[in-house]
Amino acid sequence: MARQIVTQQAVTDAAEALIVEGAEPSIVAVQARIGGGSYSTVKKFLDVWKQQRAEAATAAPETPAEVQAKGQEFARIVWALASREAQAEAQQAKDEAQAAVAAVRVELAEATNEIARLEGVEAAQAATIDQQAAKLREVELALAEAQTQARRVAELEKSLADLRAELDASRKDATDKAVEAGRLAGEGEALRAQVRELMDAIKPQAKK
């Protein structure tokens, strides 16, 4: 909703209407009549209206003393009301300002506490990250060591397979050699038997 624009004419019309209704044209009453306006703006225009009324009254025929007295009393009443309203509004503005300052201080304290909490959380997270990084480095080293050991196991397994193959070959060679030795031993024994037979056959003829 657009803010009400206060003009001299609006304040003058409102004050005149209040006078006609028999009401006091105070700043608050004028504000209520025109539907807004700041205290200072309405007061400025209302002072102009009062000045204009005073000048009009001076230019008019001489006012009876009784009327002047009533007018002065009325002016004093208006001034007293305006003064009280001004004081009340000033006190209200002061109270609102103090409340706003207190609220800002509370918000500032809450913000300071939140910053401290976030800094603590950040420090804790940084420490956790450092710990996790250290554990990761340990795991990486362990993995590298395991991979090295795995390669060594594969090499050892290959060496063992080679040794087994050599042992099997040696066993087969030894078996073949044993068989050959047996065969040669049999042939040798057969030759010795033939030599003995020949010797036995030669001995009788040598005696003759």
Image (spheres, rainbow, N blue to C red):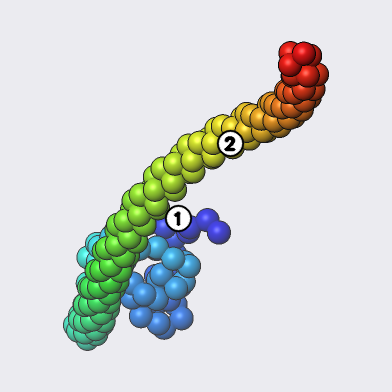
Q: Element type at marker 1?
A: loop
Q: Is residue 44 above or below residue 157?
A: below
**Which sits in the foreground, 126 or 103?**
126
Q: Pointer 1: what residue?
A: 5
| Badge 2 density bin: few <14, some 14–19, many ≥20, Cα 10 Å | few
Q: Position of residue 178 (x, y in %)?
A: 70, 30
**Which sits in the foreground, 36 or 166?**
166
Q: Is residue 34 left or right of residue 124?
A: right
Q: Position of residue 174 (x, y in %)?
A: 66, 30
Which quadrant is the N terminus positioned in?
bottom right
**Which sits in the foreground, 37 or 161?**
161
Q: Pointer 2: what residue?
A: 160
Residue 105 figure quarter? bottom left
Q: Is residue 187 left or right of residue 33?
A: right
Q: Is residue 141 left or right of residue 60?
A: right
Question: Of label 2 and label 1, which has the lower sequence position?
Answer: 1
> Who's the residue at 40% across and 63% down the image?
37
How many labels, in total? Answer: 2
Amino acid beneath label 1: Ile
Foreground disc of the pair 2, 1:
2
Q: Is residue 87 above or below residue 127?
A: below
Q: Is residue 79 left or right of residue 164?
A: left
Q: Which mark is residue 155?
A: none
> Who's the residue at 40% across and 71% down the image?
30
Q: Is residue 190 above or below residue 143?
A: above
